[in-house]
Image (cartoon, rainbow, N blue to C red):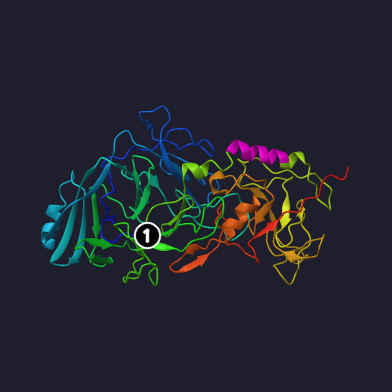
Amino acid sequence: MVLKGSSEALCPPPSLELRPSCNKSQPSPPLGSSSQPHDGVISEDKEPIKYGELIILGHNGSLANGDKGRRRSRLALYKRPKANGVKPDVIHNVSTPLVSKALSNKSQHSISYTLSRSHSVIVEYTHDINTDMFQIGRSTESMIDFVVTDTAGSSSGHGGGATGEGGGGGQSAQSTISRYACRIMCERSAPYTARIYAAGFDSSKNIFLGERAAKWRTSDGLMDGLTTNGVLVMHPAGEFVSEPAPGVWREISVCGNVFALRETRSAQQRGKLVENESNTLQDGSLIDLCGATLLWRTPAGLRHIPTLKQLESLRQELNAARPQCPVGFNTLAFPSLAQREIVDKKQPWVYVNCGHVHGYHNWGYRKEKGPTSPGGTAPAGTGERECPMCRRVGPYVPLWLGCEGGLYLDAGPPTHAFCPCGHVCSEKTVVGWSQIPLPHGTHAFHAACPFCGTWLTGEQGHVKLIFQGPVD
């Protein structure tokens, strides 16, 4: 989301809190190692208390140019040694020329709502000992705990993860993610409830909603507002693990209230207040920052996902079965989890419309379906192919094992693949994600592969894989 004026931030309710100097994060625990402390944060107990983990969709376990510090594809939030929360304290109605003076105190957190050229409302915040705050945004300043840039979904099925981080090929010319996009407030006592709020405090501990930003007075005389491109949240309709089903996308305000979506992403007219829903994150809640979508997993939910070691075991089991190409009779093998860019010679390929798994071959193109060369063949990975087993025509892509365990809904065997990208995981995982419409652009929604961001195609968006065992 693009910030208006200097920065967009959010106005936390009594439970929100923020700290002037957020610890710079060290690499978060790798996939499956959820017991390792983050940020060097160690609680009074030997085992640090984890609030949950944030996973960026479309990166399949790591960013294109590697996970570094606070810029990564996955971040665990742990209880801080000392609370860094703030909560609303005093409200001032001031003339706009006095705003800069009122905001000059860098030891005081505040939110400024510019109502007109001559009138602003400033809400001062005070320390809250009961909450920890974690800020998310595009800015690399120290108060941002999780640095997120635009994720570019792939339109083809190649590669094991999307680009778009830290100057990669998917980095857009002008990001639509706010520098101070949102913040998550976690209660320091059980049950460690986590809440999401639009916008975050900048380096001067201020949140500034300019004259053009959507803002209003609430029924109790307080202020609230929305950021330019909005922070959207979708809570699962049921239990994310046991009965995955999509909920309804909503917009979260600066003060954590829930609204129906605006007509378009940055429209000035807010949606209708949804009073019976809250900003409390659940296992499987999705947070969209207009350029990147994050998944929230709770410690309880993370206990059901496969670890990196388990995924490697599943890969070895697949290869130990010695699947063969039904035409060339050559033995196929899934590449290592670390290999995500280069297609291996033994890598299995699939006809995504039928699920028949083959080794790679450069024939079977339908001239009327895709581009061909004068010799009657097309470049690898383009056009559509005719399956030699069932004659169904469709995309023909290499298979990649989904490496980000946090995106799995269970630890079941990798029997299915998303269409048309070819990312392989459990049946429950492909079925669950195929039902979830993810935001795209200003008002469009489309189901996508969570591992690479490719839009799903076909009636179901996934296919059951049909392997042929060894003939001997």
Q: Residue at x 49, y 37 (%)?
A: 34
169 is within the stretch colored magenta = no
Tell whether 111 sits left or right of 302: left
Q: Main secondary structure of the magenta part?
A: helix
Q: Residue at x 80, y 65 (%)?
A: 391
Tell whether 260 sits left or right of 436: left
Local crowd at mark 1 within 10 Å, few (<14), some, or many (≥20)?
Answer: many
Please, what secondary structure does the residue beneath circle 1 have?
A: loop
309 is within the stretch colored magenta = yes
Q: Position of residue 36 (x, y in %)?
A: 46, 32
Tell whether 231 sits left or right of 168: left
State the quadrant of the N terminus: bottom left
Amino acid type at image mark 1: Met
Q: Residue at x 72, y 39 (%)?
A: 317
Q: How many marks?
A: 1
Q: Position of residue 70 (x, y in %)?
A: 40, 42
Q: Position of residue 390 (x, y in %)?
A: 81, 63
Q: Up-down: is 302 above or below 81?
A: below
What's the magenta region? 308-317
Q: Residue furthest right?
A: 472
Between 214 and 244, the residue placed more toward the observer is 244
- For the question of whether residue 66 can be seen, the reply is no
Between 218 and 58, the residue placed more toward the observer is 218
Q: Position of residue 307 (x, y in %)?
A: 57, 39
Q: Residue furthest top?
A: 46
Q: Find disc 1 in the rendering and name its residue.
A: 1
- For the question of whether residue 197 can be seen, the reply is yes
State the quadrant of the C terminus: top right
Tell whether 133 sits left or right of 367: left
Between 446 and 387, the residue placed more toward the observer is 446
Q: Which quarter of the figure has residue 334?
A: top right
